Amino acid sequence: MADFTLENLRTAGIGFRRNYQQGFDQHKPMWPTIATEVPSTTTANEYGWLGEFPGMREWIGERVIRQLGSHDYRIKNRKFELTVAFKLDDLADDNLGIYKPRMEGLGNGVARHPDKLIFEALELGFSAECYDGQNFFDTDHPVLDEEGKEKSVSNFWAGDKPAWYLFDTTRSLKPLVRQVRQKPVFNAMTDINSERVFMLDEVVYGAKTREAAGYGFWQLAFASKEEFTPDNFAKVYTAMKSQEGDYGTKLTIQPNILMVPPSLEDAANILMSVEKFENGKPNPHRNKCKVEVCPWLSS
C-alpha cells in the first residue's frame, strides 16, 4: 500500500464512471413501448383525473365542466440502489481490469431496472388496483351506460395459459406509468479517512434512484390467459376496439401492440405476418399489430 495515492483513487473513479456509463448505454429499454414517463416532485403523485377519459362534445348552452379527481389513485415513489465495493489493494496495485466488467454490470443493472419495474407491474395487474378501484386487468370495471346506470366492462379473459396482451400506445398517456422522482445517480464513497476504509480497506461505488410503476387507462390494455389462437386474438381485438366510455362515448381504441412472452413468439409472429392460413383461407389479422416479445413476461 505504500504506493497508493489519492491520484490512484481519482484516476480509478474516472475509469469506473466511464465503465458504468458504457454498461448503462448497452441496454435498450423496452418499457417505453407500453409506459409513459411522468415526472414527480413529491413523495407520491395523485392520478384522480384518470377517472375522465377525455372526449369532445357539441357545445349547446353552457360548457360541461369535467370534474377531474373523482377517483382516489396515487403512485408512491420507492427508493432503489445498487452498490459494489472495491479493495484498496487492487487500486494500489493498479489491478483495475478485474473491476471493469463489474462496473459495466452495475451500469447495465441500473439501466434494466425500469424494465423490471414496469413489467412486474404489468404482471401484477391481475391483482393490483388501478384508478377505478378494480384490478387493472378485471372483468368488472364500472362504466356508466347511456342512461347513466353503472355496468361492468372487462379488459381480461381468464384461462390457464401464459398471458398475452394487446395495447393501444397511440395516446399521449400509455397504458402504464413510469413515475420518476430521481433519475439514476452514480456516486462514490471514497474518503480514505472514512470508517469504512479504516475498518474494511475498501471504497464503495453505487447508484440510486427514486421511482415507481403504476397504471394509466385500463381501456388501453387487454389481457388474455386463453390459448393464443386466431379466434381468441380476434375476440380480444374486437372487444378492445369496441370499448365505450361513460354515457356511450366512443373511445376509438386502436390496438397496435401485441405483447407476448417468449413461449408465444413464433405463434404471434406467424399470425401477424402470413397472408394465408394452412387451410388456404386469407389471414384477416396480418399486420394488425406490431409483435413485441418480452423476456420479462412469464411463459
Image: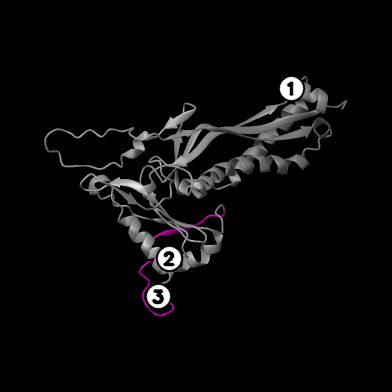
Q: Label 2 vs label 1: CA separation?
A: 57 Å
Q: Tell me the SS state at disc 2.
A: helix
Whether residue 264 is visible here, answered yes or no, is yes
Q: Magenta region's main secondary structure?
A: loop
Q: Label 3 vs label 2: CA separation?
A: 11 Å
Taking the image as shown, residue 19 lies to the left or right of residue 225, namely right
The amino acid sitting under disc 2 is Met
Q: Are dots 3 and 2 in contact, CB under 8 Å?
A: no
Position of residue 213 measured from the top left corner of the image (x, y, whole percent)? 50, 40
Position of residue 51 measured from the top left corner of the image (x, y, whole percent)? 33, 39
From this view, report whether residue 200 is shown above or below residue 102: above
The amino acid sitting under disc 1 is Asp
Taking the image as shown, residue 218 lies to the left or right of residue 147, namely right
| Nearer-the-camera pick, 140 or 119 | 140
Q: Tell me the SS state at disc 3.
A: loop
Q: Residue under label 1, please give it.
A: 191
Q: Residue under label 2, please give it.
A: 272
